[in-house]
Image (cartoon, coloured by chain):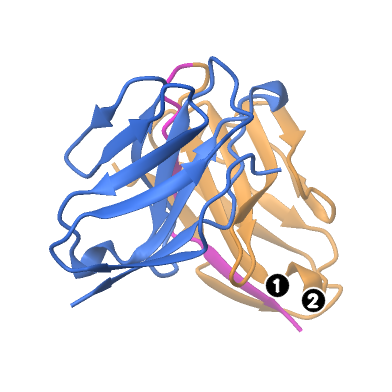
Amino acid sequence: DAKTTQPPSMDCAEGRAANLPCNHSTISGNEYVYWYRQIHSQGPQYIIHGLKNNETNEMASLIITEDRKSSTLILPHATLRDTAVYYCIVRVTNTGNQFYFGTGTSLTVIP
Amino acid sequence: NAGVTQTPKFQVLKTGQSMTLQCAQDMNHEYMSWYRQDPGMGLRLIHYSVGAGITDQGEVPNGYNVSRSTTEDFPLRLLSAAPSQTSVYFCASRIQGKYPYEQYFGPGTRLTVT
């Protein structure tokens, strides 16, 4: 039970912002939203996480709705190297703080 | 430091054979876990450990055993390999009990069972 819903695929033009949506309507009040990405067949890589407030780091921004039922990962200036599968994860607190990955969104950045 | 390392990178087994996938981390992380990823799918949790001597099952534990005798190592054993266990296996580690629970993943082991 991944507890998140993401579109299976998206395209984005190089240099434009990529906005990746995620629904997590059953999220609990103290559960964080995490984003990871997996480039080709490598191990997943942490991008960003958030609880309530919007967050920004050197890789991306995370916008969480006020009701916390959905969020959007923003890659401000997508490059070809951002082509990857992006996973939105809500940590499941009732099973020892485990991460459950869904199938993610396959983002293709087009030249 | 090397982060999370996994060996071997590739392995081919015959049905019924057993083997151990190795995972090690040098970040002194208490929490370690194993995931499998089937083609076109996300990662599914097999087993995890919150410290030496403590292990527990994830989503898909059947056919796999784990043990954790040291903080650094978390081997995954396939008892009797089956074609359904053909997959890419990822090991991950993180600090236990503290936010933000950022996980660090190894490069993966690609296993084929014929």
The answer to whether B64 is drawn above or below residue A73 in the figure is below
Badge 1 element: loop
The answer to whether A80 is drawn above or below residue B29 in the figure is below
Residue B83 badge: 2
The answer to whether A102 is drawn above or below residue A94 in the figure is below
User: What whole-number distance in Å separates the C-alpha atoms at marks 1 and 2?
Assistant: 6 Å
**B33 falls in the magenta region:** no
Region rendered in magenta: B98-114
Q: Residue A74: x percent and y percent?
A: 27, 46
Could you say which is closer to the camera, residue B69 or residue A33? A33
Q: Residue B60: x percent and y percent?
A: 77, 50
Q: Residue B18: x percent and y percent?
A: 79, 66
Q: Which chain is blue?
A: A
Q: Residue at x 39, y 20 (%)?
A: A52
Could you say which is closer to the camera, residue B47 or residue B67? B47
Badge 2 element: helix
Q: Which chain is orange?
A: B
Residue on which disc 1 sits: B86
Q: Residue at x 52, y 17 (%)?
A: B97
Subunit under mark 2: B
Q: Residue at x 41, y 28 (%)?
A: A65
